Image (cartoon, rainbow, N blue to C red):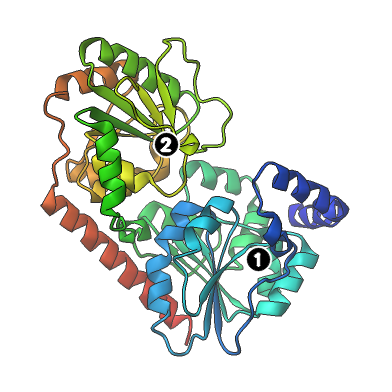
């Protein structure tokens, strides 16, 4: 019943879609020149032969499947690999990473007419949804066409499972449409199986494959020159409320340590206001090409795709989304660089990742603003950020195993 209602609403919304998309263009949430892709009209030529379509929601998921794309390129039976995402930031990141027979398009909205147009054009042999992307109309149409459908790097929290379980008939109809599900952890395997995906297997977390790219020496040297001998805290992927915490921390620490600076890398850089500057801190903003000066207290790194650069020069790393009720953000990139991950208690979105990093003694839990301040003061003169070679090697092996497991399943479903 719910799925029928969802489809009816989709049809009713159809006349208003141009208004909706034009609004998103004005908000810079869509790329005007590529807006037709949201209507299911491709801007990339389809090659003859077998096509694998992979859909990833945003930046993190997109980067995690790049090793999979590279492995698929080695398969002579596959003529083209299509990667879709829904955000402009992911499109910009993937622009220079997808080459040869792999290309990027924006996923059409989950409206039947756009879906049919998209699938009629691409006719994929295998469709792979990454992590937790569920689009009911797409799933229904894919199932109707008897195209193989799988979830890769599947992740489901207890809250999500409980929510889906409230609508048993609907969830069973949706999830039973998947032919196979490869999961990040055993809990997710159990949840997906109970919701209706019979062929469910734990393959490991592909985000452990996403090793940081080699950085240009000029960029690193330029940043180091601006920072001088400052002691640096990088607050990464912060959410509303956490920037205020970092501002308070910066104000307090600078009373004693004049060489301290915070670099804030907000999760959503387009937010109009990150915090009230009640302490009258000196702020420089990267997107405005403002340099870090001797009296700069906070540097707002509101650009896309540079997080690795700031991790590289950090003395301390705090991963956001964890001191507010969000569920945490991905700590793997910083861990690959041997950084100790400071985080809050709300890390349920990456609990399995943190469990591994905790076992490797690469994390430190702070429950509130005061504990974060105490940690910084206690470790100020000797931050634990040296390269932990054995731990980094273990992280790498986790990624290699996850990729091998995933490719084994994918290749089986291409036969």
Q: Residue at x 26, y 9 (%)?
A: 255
Could you tell me if residue 166 is visible in this image?
yes
Relative to 349, 25 lies left or right: right
- What secondary structure is found at the residue carrying circle 2? loop
Q: Along the polypeptide, which appears first: circle 2 or circle 1? A: 1
Q: How far apart are marks 2 and 1 (CA)?
A: 38 Å
Query: Would residue 11 appear left or right of 88 to someone viewing this image?
Result: right
Q: Residues within 10 Å of mark 1 (few under 14, many from 20)?
A: many
The structure residue drawn at horizontal position 32% and vertical position 23%, both measured from the top left corner, is 367
> Which residue matches tag 1?
139
Residue at image position (47%, 69%) is 98
Give the percent coordinates (x, y) of residue 394.
18, 56
Q: Is residue 154 above or below residue 123?
A: above
> In the figure, residue 271 lies in which quadrant?
top right
Q: Which corner quadrant holds the N terminus?
A: bottom right
Where does residue 89 sit, x and y in percent of width and height? 53, 51
Q: Please, what secondary structure does the residue beneath circle 1 have? A: helix
Q: What numbered label is drawn on residue 301?
A: 2
Q: How many marks?
A: 2
Regarding residue 155, the answer to whether it shows in the image is no
User: Could you say which is closer to the camera, residue 318 or residue 254?
Assistant: 254
> Residue 90's x, y, as percent?
52, 55
Left or right: 237, with 133 as reference point: left
Q: Which of 331 and 179 is in front in this view?
A: 331
Callout 2: 10 Å neighbours few (<14), some, many (20+)?
A: many
* 151 relative to 280, above or below: below
What residue appears at the point 28 percent right and 62 percent down from the top-left corner?
A: 399
Tell me whether circle 2 and circle 1 mark residues in contact (CB < 8 Å): no
| Residue nearer the viewer, 89 or 141 | 89
User: In the drawing, does residue 253 fall left or right of residue 361?
Assistant: right
């Amino acid at each position: 019943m719910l799925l029928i209602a969802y489809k009816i609403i989709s049809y009713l919304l159809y006349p208003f879609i141009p208004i909706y998309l034009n609004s998103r263009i004005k908000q810079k949430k869509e790329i005007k020149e590529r807006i037709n892709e949201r209507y299911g009209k491709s801007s990339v030529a389809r090659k003859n032969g077998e096509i694998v379509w992979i859909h990833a929601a945003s930046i993190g998921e997109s980067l995690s499947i790049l090793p999979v794309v590279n492995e698929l390129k080695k398969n002579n039976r596959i003529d083209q690999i299509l990667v879709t995402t829904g955000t402009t930031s992911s499109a910009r990141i993937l622009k220079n990473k997808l080459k040869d027979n792999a290309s990027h398009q924006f996923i059409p909205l989950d409206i039947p007419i756009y879906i049919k147009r998209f699938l009629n054009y691409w006719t994929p042999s295998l469709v792979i949804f990454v992590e937790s992307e569920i689009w009911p109309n797409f799933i229904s149409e894919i199932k109707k066409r008897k195209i193989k459908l799988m979830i890769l790097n599947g992740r489901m929290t207890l809250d999500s499972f409980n929510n889906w379980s409230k609508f048993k008939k609907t969830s069973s109809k949706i999830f039973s449409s998947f032919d196979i599900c490869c999961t990040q952890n055993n809990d997710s395997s159990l949840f997906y199986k109970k919701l209706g995906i019979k062929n469910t297997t734990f393959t490991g977390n592909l985000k452990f494959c996403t090793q940081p790219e080699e950085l240009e020496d000029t960029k690193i040297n330029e940043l180091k020159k601006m920072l001088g001998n400052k002691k640096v805290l990088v607050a990464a992927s912060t959410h509303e409320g956490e920037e205020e915490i970092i501002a308070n921390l910066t104000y307090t620490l600078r009373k004693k340590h004049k060489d301290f600076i915070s670099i804030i890398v907000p999760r959503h850089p387009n937010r109009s206001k990150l915090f009230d500057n009640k302490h009258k801190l000196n702020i420089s903003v990267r997107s405005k090409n403002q340099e870090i000066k001797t009296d700069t207290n906070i540097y707002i790194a509101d650009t896309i795709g540079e997080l690795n650069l700031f991790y590289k020069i950090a003395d301390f790393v705090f991963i956001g989304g964890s001191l507010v009720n969000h569920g945490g953000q991905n700590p793997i990139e910083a861990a690959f660089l041997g950084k100790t991950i400071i985080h809050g208690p709300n890390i349920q979105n990456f609990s399995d990742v943190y469990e591994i990093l905790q076992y490797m003694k690469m994390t430190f839990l702070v429950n509130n603003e005061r504990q974060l301040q105490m940690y910084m003061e206690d470790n100020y003169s000797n931050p634990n950020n040296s390269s932990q070679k054995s731990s980094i090697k273990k992280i790498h092996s986790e990624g290699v195993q996850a990729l091998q497991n995933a490719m084994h399943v994918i290749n089986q479903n291409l036969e």
